[in-house]
Structure formats: C-alpha cells, structure tokens
Image (cartoon, coloured by chain):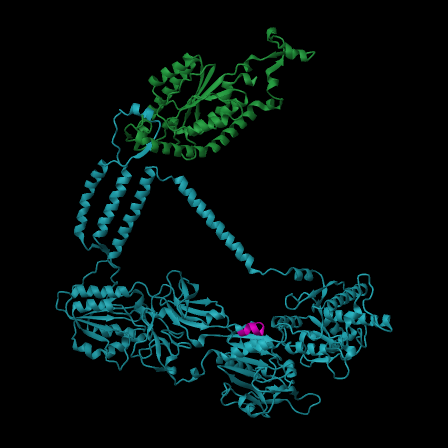
Amino acid sequence: MRQPDHTSSAREALHHEAEEAAGSLPSLLLEADHLANTVLAGVHGRRRAGSGETFWQFRPFVEGDVSTQIDWRQSARNDDRLYIRQREWEVAATAWLWRDPGLSMDYACTDKLPSKRRRADVLATALCSLLARAGERTGYAGSNRRPYMGRRAAETFAAEIVDEGFSTDRLPPVVSAAGEKKYVIFSDFFLPPVELEPRLKAIAAERASAHLVQVIDPSEEDYRFEGRTEFLDRVQGLPALLFGDAAAVAGEYRKLFRAHQGWLEDMCRHYGWSFMTHRTDHTPETALIALYRALAPEALV
Amino acid sequence: MLPAELGFSAPLILSALVLLPVIWLILRALPQAPRRLAFPGYFFLKQISNTEETPSRTPWYILLLRLLILAAVIIALAGPFLNAPERLARSGPVLIVLDDGWAAADNWALRQNTLAGIASEVDGTDRQVWLLRTTPVVSGQTESALVGPMTADQLSRLSDTIEPVALASDRGRVLSAAASALASLGDGLDIRWLSDGLFTGPDIDERQFLRRLDDYGTVTAYVPDDLPLVLSSITYRSDSLQAVVQSPTSMIAERAGQVNILARDGRLIEQTEFLLPEGATQANVEIDLPLTLRNEIGQIRLAGERSAAAVQLADASTRRAQVGLAGSTDGTSGTLLDSRFYLQQALSPYALFRTDTISNLATSDATVIILDDIGRLRDGDAEALAAWVAEGGVLIRFSGPVLADASQDASVNVERSLLPVPLRGGGRAFGGALTWEEPQTLGGFGEDSPFADLVVAEDVEIRRQVLARPGADTSERSWAWLEDGTPLVTARADGNGLIVLFHVTAAPDWSDLPISGLFVDMLRRLTALSVTETERRDPDRAVVPRRILNGFGRLQAAPDDARPVSVATADDVASAAVPAGLYGDPDTPLAVNVLNSDSKIQALEAIGAFDGIAVRAYAGMDVSQLAVWFLLLALVLFLIDTLVMLHLNGKLILGRSSRAVAILFVASVCVLSLSVTDAAAQIRPPIDPKAADAALYTRFAYVVTGDREADEISRAGLYGLSQRLRERTALEPADPEGVSPERDELSVYPLIYWPILPGASVPSEAALARLEAYMARGGLIIFDTRDGDRVFGNQQTEEGAALRRILEQLNIPPLEPVPTGHVLRRSFYLMDDFPGRNSEGPVWVEARSVTGNVNDGVTPVIISGRDWASAWAIDEGGRPLRNMGGASLAAREAAYRTGINIAMVALTGNYKVDQLQAEALLDQLGEEQR
C-alpha cells in the first residue's frame, strides 16, 4: 500500500511512464505486424484466396466422415454435394498470452540486440495478431479484461502490454474466466522452482494447455565473462557478487543454467505442454512459426 | 674520441629505486578495480556465490609497466647526463685560442660548453685565463683580440654570452698582432686551441700557426668532428639560378640536403634539393623560379646549417627585369624577319619575357614594356601605360610602317601618344633605287644618356627611319643620332619612368642595328635602368650598413657605430672593415656576403695542421637532455598502461575504435578527392557552346548592329553568298551566324561582315582588343558603310563618320585602294571592279609595304561603301531580297563574284598571293639551279 501523500507523485510518474510507453507502441505494433505478415505468408500460402470465413465453416463430405456431421441445410443448396460443419470453429478457445513483467526481462548484452522484454512483446503481439486473423480469441492474462477478437485485437493487446510497468510479481497468473484456455507464457523463467512449480500446477489443474517460451539473452546462455567482475542484481536488489575471475565459474554457471532448463522441460512434458527457448539473437520468425503451429494445428489443415 | 661518460647531477635521488620492490609488493596486494554489470544470470550466480572468491592479482605485465614508469621518473629526477667534461692535469696560465668565425657557428654550443669546462677546471686554482679570438679586428678599434686576465668565474660568464662573428678566422695575422702581448705572459702557457677546423686564405700561414703557437707553451687542440657545408656563391643565369654548395673535405658518404630561398620579408619562396655525391667537394644546385619570385629573393641559405657562410644575401643587381612585349604582328613566326626574335635574343640573359596585350602588360609587374611598331594607342591603353610609366616603368618603342603611318596624323599629341618627340609622318628612306642618299651610319651618343660610354660601331647602316619633328626638345632628348644628326634614339623622362623610341625597326629590315652587338648593349642598359638605381653605378658613393649578418647567419640591425663604406669596397667579400650584410637603400640594397665564387674552403686537417699535438674532441651535449627522454619514456609507458587498463575493464572495444579510424580515413580521402576533382574542373574555363558549334563548321559571321532590318540583310546576304559558294566552289559554308565583338569568340569565323550604320557607337576597349587580335591572327573584317551611291567628292556621310570613329580606336595597318594585280582581283574570278548594290567609291585594303605586311600579305580589312550584303541577300527560296536596278542579273552576278573572291582571300589568302607571284618564284628557283 502506498502512503496517501505519495499518490500524486506516483500518479505523475505513472503518467509519464505511460506516455513514454505509448511512444513505443506504434513501433512495436509495426514490428509485430510485419513479423506476423512474414509468418502468415510463409505458413498459409493460398489460404487467403478464398472468399472468407464461411468457406471454412463447411467442407465437402468425404468418405470416413461421420454422417451425423453433415449439415443438411447447406448440402440441400447443392445437388451433388454434401457438406459437413466443422465443430472446431464453433467452439473458439481463448489464448491467454502473458509476458513476464519483471526487471530481469529488461536486459540486452549489447545495444544491437533488443531487450528480452521487447522481444517477448513483439512475439506476443505478433502471435495475437495471427490468432485474431484466424478467428481465435486472445487475451492478456495479466489484466482482467475480456479477451479480444477481430482486427483491432493486436492493437488493443499491444497497448495493454506496453502500458504495463515493471513488477516484482513474476509468476504467471491463473485466469479465472470460463471456457477452454490456452496459455502462452513468455518469460526467462529465472525463478526458483519452489515458487514456479505450484503456479504451473495450478494452471494444469484448470485442464488448460500451456506453451512456455523462454526468452533469453545470448550472454545468459553462453556466459562469456572473464576477469574481475562484479554482478549486480536488479530484480530483488540483493548484494552484488564479486568474482576474482568470472571465467572460473563459467562451467558451474552453465551447468546450473542447463539444469534449470531441463527442469522446465520436464515440467512441460509432464503436463503435456510445449516448451521452447528463444534467444534474442535469433530471428523471431522461427519462434513465431513454431508457436503458431503448436497453438492452432487445426487451422493449418 | 673517448666514450661518453654517464653522470648524474643528483645521484642521491637514485636511492629511491630501492623502493621499487616495496611498491611491487603493494601493487600485487591491491586488486584491480572490477567491472560492474547488472546481469539477470545473477539468479544462477547467487547459487554459486558461496565458492571462495580468489583475490585477483594485477597481471604481472601491468606491474612491470608501472614499476618501469616509476623507475624512469626516478632516474629522470636524478638528472642523468652524458659526456661529463674531462680534466687535464696542467698548471700555469691558460691561453684559450678561440676560432670564433662563421665556421664555428654551427656547433657553437660545443665551444661554450668547452669554455665552461675549462672554467670549471681552473675554478679553485689561481691560474689566469686569457682568451685570444682569431677573427680579424678592425685595426683602429680599441677592442683587442686578446682578452684577459680572467678568473674562472668571468670565463664562465663569458662562455654564456660569447658569439661567433660572420668572418673567417685569420689566425696568422691575429697571432702576429698579439705577439708582443703574448710574449709578456711568458712561456709555459697551457694553450687550448678551440679550432674550427677550416681555413680560407693561403695555407702557409696555417702551416706556421701551430709552430708559432708552440713557442708560447703546450698546445692542446680541440677539433670538431664534422665540418660545416657552405654556400659559396649564387650565379644568376638567364633561365635559372645556380647555387654552389661546398664542402671543405671530399665527402666520405653521399649527402643530400636542401637549399632554402627566402624572400626579403623572410618568407620561404622555394626549397630545392641538392646531393653531394661521395668524394665530391662541390655541388651545383639549379633553382628554377618564376621571375616575379626571383625578384623577391632576399637570401638563399642551406637548410640545417647555422652559419653565416651558409647564407648568400641577394641584392638589387641580381634582380632581373621582366619585359613585356606587345606588337602589331602576331610574332609567332620566330623567323629572322620577326622583330621579336631580335629583341628576345638581345635581352634573354638579362630579362624574362611576357607577350600580352598592352592593357594586361601595364597592370602586370613588368618593369620594361616594349611596343614593337604600335601606331595608335587606344585611350584606355594609353592611360594605363602612362600611369605605369609614371610609376617608374621603362617604355621602349620601336618604329615601323604602322607607327610611321600613324604619326602622319598631325592631331596626334606627343604627350598622349607616349612618344618622346613629335614625329614626322612617313619616314625617310636612304639608299633606295630612286634616292641618291647613301645609307647613313651612326653619328654618336648623348653625353647624359646611358649609352654615353658605348663605342660607335662603324658598320651599322641605317636605311630607313622615322623622323623627329625639329624642335627645341628634340636635340636634348636624343640619346643617339646618325651622321647627319637626325635622332636615332630619343627618350623622355615621364614621372619616375622613361619613354624611349628607337627610330628604326627591331628587325634588320630598316637598319643593321638589330644584328649588331651595340643593340644588345643598348637594350641591356635600358632594361637595367628599370631595376637598379642610376646612382648605383657610382663606385665612390658611400653606403651605410643597414642590416648586418651575425655569425649564425641571421640578419640583425646594424650597430649604431657602424661606419659607411664606399660602393667599391663593398663589392668584395666581407672583411673586418666591411661586415657582411645589406647596405644602402632598403629597396635596392647592396649585399656583402661572407663568401663569393672565388672563396676556397679547406680543412686544416688536410694540410696536417694538427700534427704533433694533443688533439681532443669538444665536450658534447648538455645535461638535462637525458632527463627529458626519461620523462618522455615514463609518459609513453603511462599511456600504454592506461590503454591496457581500459581494455582489461572492457571499456575500450578495439573493433569499434578501429572502425571509427577507418571511417575518418575514408572520409578524409573522400574530401581530398572531391577537392582534387573540383580543382581540375576549375583549370579549364568552359567553352562557349556557340563558339564550339562555329568551330565545327566553317561559317561566316556578321556583326549584329541592333537594327533588325540591317541584321536581316546581313544574314540573308551571307546566306546567299554561302549558297553561291556551295554551288561554285569547294567551300561549303554552314549558315551564317550573328556575332557581337563584345561577347563572342571571333577567332572561329574566317570572315566577319560589319555593316556600319549611321551613328554606330565605338565598341568597348575589350571588344576593340578582341577585334585587333582577330585581325592579327588571320581574320578578315569587311567594313561596309553602304553609302557608295550617296558620296559625292570628299563629302562625308554619317556612316563614314561612324566608321572613322571606330577606326581611330583600332590599330589597323596603312590602307590603299585595291591596286591592280591585287590578290582580291585574282583569287577566283578575274575582276576589274568589286560591285555591290552600287559600284561607287574606292575599296580599301591593307597597303602593300616594303617592310612586309601583317598576316603574310593577306589584308585583314576590306573597307568600302558598296552595300554587298544587299546585293547578295536571298531568302530561303532563293529569291533576291533587294532590287538591283537596271541590268539586275549581270549586276547581281558581279556582286556574287566579288563575294566569292573575298571569301577565297579570307580562306586561302597567302596561298593565292603566292600563286600570283609564282612566276617570280620560279624565276628565282631557276636561277638558283643554274
């Protein structure tokens, strides 16, 4: 809780932050849109040549289809064909996207790479855009808003995540809304298993499926530091760690890093979720295609 | 030479070096500053932070670097020096014989150090010190060559202030002069001879010097390691300067160097390399300089040599005149008929030439302008020339047919026309077929003239001359005259300058003068008038020293007690009475140099002057020099240390900085290449597209008058003529072009038709100059007043008056009506007359002249009032535009024939002239063969 006398200045700071964030919104949207279009062109090919959504709601009856699925009203319009209605399109699942708002995500080892948070924002927005075009509903798990649909979904989504400040609560939330849910969680998951495991368990208990995307900086995985180095902690403000020769602990660091990644993979496999790692020095297209395929296998048929 | 000794001025400070191991230990204990960074991987690192932190050591090379820095600083503070002075175990009074001439100047500090060394040697003893300087002293002066006795302290102070003199040592004479004083000091002197290793005079004195010196005591000679190079003389050649670099000994190894040429204000004008090959004692250095720069030369010095003998001062007599030439003819033929050839031959050793228009010459820095047979001067040119003469220029004019013709005009004002005396028109000729006068020879030269002491050459014949009008001034203004007393050369002072007229041509067609040696002498004296003061020739004149050369070769203000010397004595090299330096008027100084071309520099060692005595080297460098080097080393090491530390802390990323360097480099190269291309583009002025087009096809031109009807007739007339030429001749001109002499390039048109309208204005000076150049280079201008049918008797029409106004300003040759047999009558059709729309009035062309014509006999102008263009004019369909009256067909045909003849003359002029004379030529050839 904040003290009353701090509220005005806090509001000002927030306002200022929001203004700054709003400035970066168009560039984020543009980048995400560009990304989504690239991916769409690669994945869909001729899909967009059709006349619209209705075409996808019916498909010709082929041998092997259950006859109860035939939509007789539609089939009656044609003499020679039977159409079946695809159930999948009727019950749209909601994809709940979430991006880790922690300070840990605000890191890039050089100026040339985007920070992890930025990359996660781009990926999430692009995914939102893709899903919206495919008719899926998407929501931001961090807020309590209703999920979005339609063409403006990506825009609203982007506005929401850009506005968000940094926070120390870095655990993915459990969405209370009803219906089928698919979680897509962008984070570096640099969290102690003791904290993370109960939350993942809670998500799994909702019978929801989840896709964990670990966004990491290349320096975090490779660990190429050497010489006398002092490491500072921005997340919790813990005392600095001084190493006489940072290179000496490289082996141990990498081992711990792999172990943590392995634990995450094991968790996901256990729940039947997907887990992927994305480095900010890799192209976002690959990650997005993989995500999209994992999320909407039906749409790709 | 003894090995250099290393010493310290404060050796105690060196004990601080003991601290170095301690500092080593401290530095090892202190870790280097860590690199700090926020890193999300902290999450993993904090799990391994419990591993013991090994204290990081500063890398050993950093430690070594820092200890080296400290050691260098400590050593620098201790004041290390090389070449500690050596001590001689002697007793008795000390006599220092100091060679303080220019030869010692280059390493003067060595002498000072040695003097200081001797001072420290005698310090604390009761030995007396005497100093004998070997440069000659003016006999009357009180200051003696021998100074003393001195204490060590006085000698030490003297060693700081003593300076070399810009003279050569004269040891023999100095020793003789000081003989009695030396004898009184008694024998057993400790004699130190601080020799400069050189001598310039006869070698007998030098051989005896040591023996005579030996009589007074024990001699120790200090001998320099290397002997200085000297600049012994400068020779002024017609096209370059030659400097002579001398070495006293033949070179052991090849040596290259530079000669610096400085202006009078001390600015560097030019630098020239020289090379003394192995075994040589002398090198001649050619210095090629534009004359303007050459006239600015104040001194020439050897770069890197610090002595008065490495400097040659330049004075007024070395400056060469810059002669501007302007003449009626183009003068490009370069043959024996060309007057310019004779002028250049006569003057080339003493002057540089520049050929240009009169107005350009008057504003240039020419000191002499020669006008070769120029008759009328345009107002602008005359004013510019008069101003230039008033400022001190020498204007030399030569006669010729054009001047003779121009001077017929009685209205020509002597003052305005820049002639020394009024002239009678036409001139006179002797010895021709119809005269019974014999060719005249030279009578004599004026007493007050610069030619006064010239010898009259008997064999010079004058066949033709322009005559001066008899008058009061004429006799006193004549500098040379013929046997019968008629002036041959007249001159008149004007302001600070001079106007000189030769009453003959500069080519040998009027007289033999141009091919005689007298001509060279006369011209040379006239050009010399422009550069040097007349009073310079007086050998008894006294000149005051203005700036004096010191031993190091620097010019200083002359001392207050400097005495004036006569010009005659100043002609030689410097002596005690006449110190080297600049004398007299600052603008036309007289230079006295330490050496001249007769000076011979030799090494004492070569004649064995040091045989049989103790020889030592001079004390070497100063002490503090080494400290500076150690401090510099410390600084460099410190910089390296900083860079290494930055790199270790990751603040210096090499890749980025090297990229920045690369970008800078590329950018600078780009800027350079851009400026280079810009400069290249600026060298050549753009070509007028109209002229370029006209140059591609032969075409005629007409002068645009501004009157539309007249211009259209001109165009149509030339168009009609061009059509006829196409039909009948091999000449196929393109369509005619209208030109303006004010703006357009005329030289691309072979023929220009110029209809003169009533009240036509005179073109500008620039346009007139362009027209003159056009005529001089083979162009043909047709002036058509179109008034032939309106002229009665001597009555002048408005057009005629306008033409007269224009021609008054133009320098055109004498004219005559077309004579019979003229090339214009024969060039294509045989013509009796040249009818246009009318056939009245004369047609004027250049008069044939015995002395040869402009343009190889092809007339540059045709003047008439026949209105040819109207007769030629046709429209596009070939229909005549103007009525020709009665027998129109025949009259028009005659006009076209006239036009074709004119075009043929314009394009094939001298060829056709030769055709006319073919018969005579063949006769001549036949005679030769026979």
Q: Give the quarter of the figure containing the C terminus of chain B.
A: bottom right
Name the side, left or right, on which B734 lies relative to B325.
right
Residue A117 image point, x, y percent: 41, 28
The percent coordinates of residue B477 (x first, y second) are 54, 88
Q: Nearer the viewer, residue B250 or B833?
A: B833
Q: Is B482 on the left or on the right of B316, as rendered?
A: right
Horizontally, residue B293 falls left or right of residue B507, namely: left
Q: Nearer the viewer, residue B154 or A92?
A: A92
User: Which color has been applied to chain A in this rendered view?
Assistant: green
Question: Where is residue A163 drawn, in percent x and y?
Answer: 42, 29
Q: Give the drawing colour for chain B.
A: cyan
Please provide the residue range marked out in magenta. B355-362
Quarter residue A47 falls in: top right
Rendering quarter of residue B7: bottom left
Between residues B741 and B236, which one lies in front from this camera angle? B741
Q: Residue at x 38, y 22 (%)?
A: A189
Up-down: is B652 above or below B728? above
